[in-house]
Image (spheres, rainbow, N blue to C red):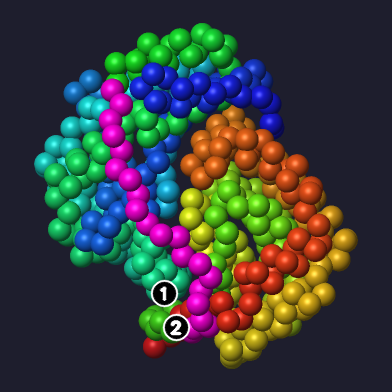
């Protein structure tokens, strides 16, 4: 899982991470850009996600109808993701066909067309995607909670953007965003699989060396501290069951507090994976919140988790409240259990179990070449690749006192925001 990788920086600033894995004749090729919803301003939200869509509309060399066809014809698959801090594109291919992926990504780094008709067509697609999500009570609650959890930071806006912005964003807005951030000195190219490092580096350099670096706009956002006061917000709409979210500020991804938080998350709600691409699954029936909320009949299901980000984000506990039960009772039970941990900590047995679960989840998230390439790029977006390489070692250093201190630092009731979505 943690075989050595090599890191190179080309003259134009492109970071290249190469990891040889000779278990199968396959290569996974990723290009990560340091741009996401964090880089957007009010009135222009959703730009990063929409630009990702436009990258599949083609260049002169690789028109839209060619991209999927050529990748599929050569036995590969491709996809892309936009998130808070980054946008990523990948192709996983037979090793002998990987030059196609390299050439596609190098070309659309600079030469995407942003045809006005395609922009308007994709406007309809993105707005429809947004409206479809609005039919989901969980999305509506999540959007309301995030807006309340961040007073000024762009993390408070959904990645897809505000609907009113999606109607007014222009082709020039999209193209300027693309030209500003899709440059080699703002990108990390990751490759894992069956290749020889020196040969692959020469091939990458041959394709990218003519792509010029450009100045990248600064991101002038201020991280937000703990949620300053307890707050409860309510949303109403058609639904079959009452949904709750309780959120607290979580540390930034490169903060050492992330590791005791991982243990605490496992103890409270069951283990979760930071690899959004390949998660794995472990039952949470022995977690404290499951026993207190689900086994007691207060909730039908619970789940907790966080993501690693450049700036502090949020830890979220979600619960589906049992019919006829009061959400306030769920909230009270959660705070009671957290107070118990703040006062008494967790046991050594809980700590060791959480470590074992974390190791298992980590193994699931590294089970194929695509996932391992993902990890190197993902860690580079908020820290560096060594964060991923040393992840288990850092978890093994966590003590029960570290977990107690982390609970006391972040999970007090006065720093909690609660959202409740119920029927009209």
Question: Which quadrant does the C terminus fall into?
Answer: bottom left
Q: Main structural element of the magenta stretch: helix, strand or loop?
A: loop
> Does the segment drawn in magenta span residue 216?
yes
At horizontal 45% and vertical 71% (from top left) the residue drawn is 149
- Residue 296, by quadrant, is bottom right
Kindly check if marks 1 and 2 are in contact, taking CB atoms under 8 A apart as contact.
yes
User: Where's residue 204, x and y in %?
Assistant: 42, 16
Tell which of 24 and 276 is nearer to you: 276
Q: Is residue 20 left or right of residue 143?
A: right
The residue lying furthest to the left in this view is 116
The residue to which callout 1 is attached is 148
Residue 219: image x %, image y %? 35, 49
Element on which disc 2 rests: strand
Which label sits on residue 333?
none
Is residue 406 shown above or below 80?
below
Instruction: Using a 10 Å C-alpha cutoff, classify the residue at mark 2 as few (fewer than 14 neighbours), some (14 to 19) or many (20 or more).
Output: some
Q: CA distance from mark 1 to mark 2?
A: 9 Å
Residue 91 seen in this snapshot:
no
Q: Residue 422: x percent and y percent?
A: 46, 84
Q: In this figure, which residue is indicated by the disc labeled 2? A: 233
Q: Residues within 10 Å of mark 1 (few under 14, many from 20)?
A: some
């Amino acid at each position: 899982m943690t075989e050595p990788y090599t890191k190179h920086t080309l003259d134009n600033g492109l970071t290249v991470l190469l990891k040889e894995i000779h278990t199968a004749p396959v290569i996974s090729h990723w290009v990560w850009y340091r741009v996401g919803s964090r880089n957007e301003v009010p009135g222009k939200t959703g730009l990063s996600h929409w630009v990702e869509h436009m990258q599949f509309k083609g260049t002169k060399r690789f028109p839209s109808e060619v991209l999927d066809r050529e990748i599929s014809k050569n036995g590969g698959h491709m996809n892309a993701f936009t998130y808070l801090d980054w946008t990523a594109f990948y192709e996983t291919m037979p090793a002998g066909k990987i030059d196609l992926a390299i050439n596609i990504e190098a070309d659309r780094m600079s030469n995407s067309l942003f045809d006005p008709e395609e922009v308007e067509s994709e406007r309809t697609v993105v707005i429809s995607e947004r409206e479809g999500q609005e039919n989901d009570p969980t999305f509506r609650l999540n959007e309301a909670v995030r807006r309340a959890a961040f007073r000024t930071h762009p993390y408070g806006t959904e990645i897809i953007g505000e609907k009113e912005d999606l109607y007014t964003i222009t082709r020039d807005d999209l193209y300027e965003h693309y030209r500003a951030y899709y440059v080699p000195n703002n990108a990390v190219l990751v490759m894992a699989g069956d290749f020889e490092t020196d040969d692959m580096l020469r091939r990458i350099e041959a394709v990218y060396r003519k792509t010029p670096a450009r100045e990248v706009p600064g991101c002038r956002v201020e991280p937000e501290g703990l949620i300053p006061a307890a707050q409860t917000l309510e949303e109403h709409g058609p639904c079959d069951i009452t949904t709750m979210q309780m959120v607290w500020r979580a540390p930034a991804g490169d903060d050492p507090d992330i590791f005791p938080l991982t243990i605490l998350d496992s103890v409270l709600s069951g283990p979760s994976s930071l690899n959004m691409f390949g998660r794995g699954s472990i039952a949470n029936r022995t977690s404290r919140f499951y026993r207190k909320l689900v086994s007691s009949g207060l909730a039908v299901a619970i789940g907790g988790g966080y993501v690693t980000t450049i700036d502090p984000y949020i830890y979220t506990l979600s619960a589906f409240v049992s019919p006829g039960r009061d959400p306030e009772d769920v909230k009270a039970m959660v705070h009671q259990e957290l107070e118990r941990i703040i006062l008494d900590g967790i046991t050594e047995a809980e700590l060791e179990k959480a470590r074992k679960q974390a190791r298992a989840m980590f193994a699931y998230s590294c089970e194929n070449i695509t996932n391992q390439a993902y990890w190197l790029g993902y860690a580079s977006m908020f820290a560096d690749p060594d964060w991923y390489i040393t992840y288990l070692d850092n978890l093994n250093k966590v003590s029960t006192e570290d977990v107690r201190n982390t609970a006391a630092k972040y999970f007090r009731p006065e720093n909690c925001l609660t959202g409740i979505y119920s029927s009209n």
